Amino acid sequence: MDKIIVRGGHALRGTIPISGAKNATLPALAATLLTGERVHLSNIPHLKDVTTMLELLGQHGAAITVDERLGVEINNSGVNNFRAPYDLVRTMRASILVMGPLLARHGMAEISLPGGCAIGSRPVNLHIEGLRKMGADISLDEGYIRAKADRLHGAHIFLNPVTVTGTENLLMAATLAKGRTTLENAAKEPEVSDLAVFLNKMGARIQGAGTSTIIIDGVDELHGTQHRIIPDRIETATFMVAAAVTHGDILLTNVDPDALETPIQKLRDAGILVEFPEPDRIRVYCPNPLKPVDLETSPYPGFPTDLQAQMLVLNSLAKGVSQITETVFENRFMHVSELQRLGADIRINGNMAEVHGVNSLLGAPVMATDLRASASLVLAGLAAHGSTTISRVYHIDRGYERIEEKLQALGADIQRTNS
């Protein structure tokens, strides 16, 4: 099993390109099922989750051509299998996103209940309830969601709580439904907005994406198109934190600063200098001691839960005491015990972590528990004295493209081994 070894103490310096957003790529790939015409997607990151989604589309009957430089072309005219099997779905929660498109275009879908990171309960009941309101007949049997519908119809759906994948699934299903669908309390994430842009290019009629109310007027069919996936804001912010904890100087290219207003403000509060030399570039450098920052995770445009673990590392090296409150997932502090092995002083009280800054971290063997936790351990290893060995790094391959190569290009002493 692969491990990553990090020998810390090197200030990261240089220029690095940010990859396309995983959380925009996965729903876009699922959305290609809504048409039988060719669709071309570019700026696709090379990630395990993306590979899994392509495998899932392939077993549904999609014809897929991958060009590592140009992107992915998908032709779903030959789709003839509407079952998403457990062996694929168990590894990636976003597999549930094929349910809405299959049901809307083909009138049936059979989806294994999804898996993914063990970071707390993320039920699919809102997907099911919304599709039922749109006329689907849905049953749960032997671990599968079985859905049928002659044709979905428009409905008024209130999502409580806010759900990103639920918003995306229902948004896709509504594009081919008869009549108007209104999604209230919809997720506002940039990835949802990017999906709406893509769908509108395919001929959908969607208004309000990026707000809490999305209105979709169904059409009879969608057509092929081309679309470039937006930059990954979580990868961007992770590298910004890497610059901070190593007191480095990094220029990030192919970024979208507008999608990072809240994290950027928190990083500036921590004493990090952030500049925008060009609209799609961010320079991050940190010549001064880090300051502790309090934060609370919340849905966009709040502070992302996917950056909570990285900010724990930053606060662990800041001068003073800080509090980080996790409101999105109830089981997302599993990385704390591993950070403590490196010398972090973090105390958990319910959904709040109290962080007492230390002068330095010391390398040690640690184990990744989920995708973002693995990123936090890499960051901690970069800042620590000595060598840090991170096991179970298959998690990091689900969300970060060639992370060791990118960090090596910035001067990090990091390598992957399967010993």
Image (spheres, helix red, strand yellow):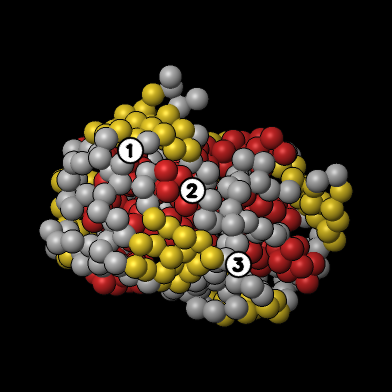
| Rendered-image quadrant of the C terminus | top left
Task: State which tag comes first along the sequence, 2 or 3.
Answer: 3
- Label for residue 254? none
Question: How far apart in space, not on screen, are marks 3 and 1 (Cα)?
Answer: 37 Å
Q: Can residue 40 be seen in this view?
A: no
Residue at 37% in and 72% down: 294
Residue closest to the eye, 171 or 151: 171
Looking at the rendered structure, the secondary structure element under dot 3 is loop
Tag 2 residue: 337
Q: Assess disc 3: are there few (<14), some (14-19) or many (≥20) residues with their C-alpha within 10 Å of its C-alpha.
A: many
Quick check: 82 left or right of 92?
right
Tag 3 residue: 163
Q: Is residue 123 above or below residue 300?
A: above
Tag 1 residue: 363
Task: State which tag comes first along the sequence, 2 or 1.
Answer: 2
Residue at 70% in and 76% down: 157
Give residue 78's quadrant in the image: top right
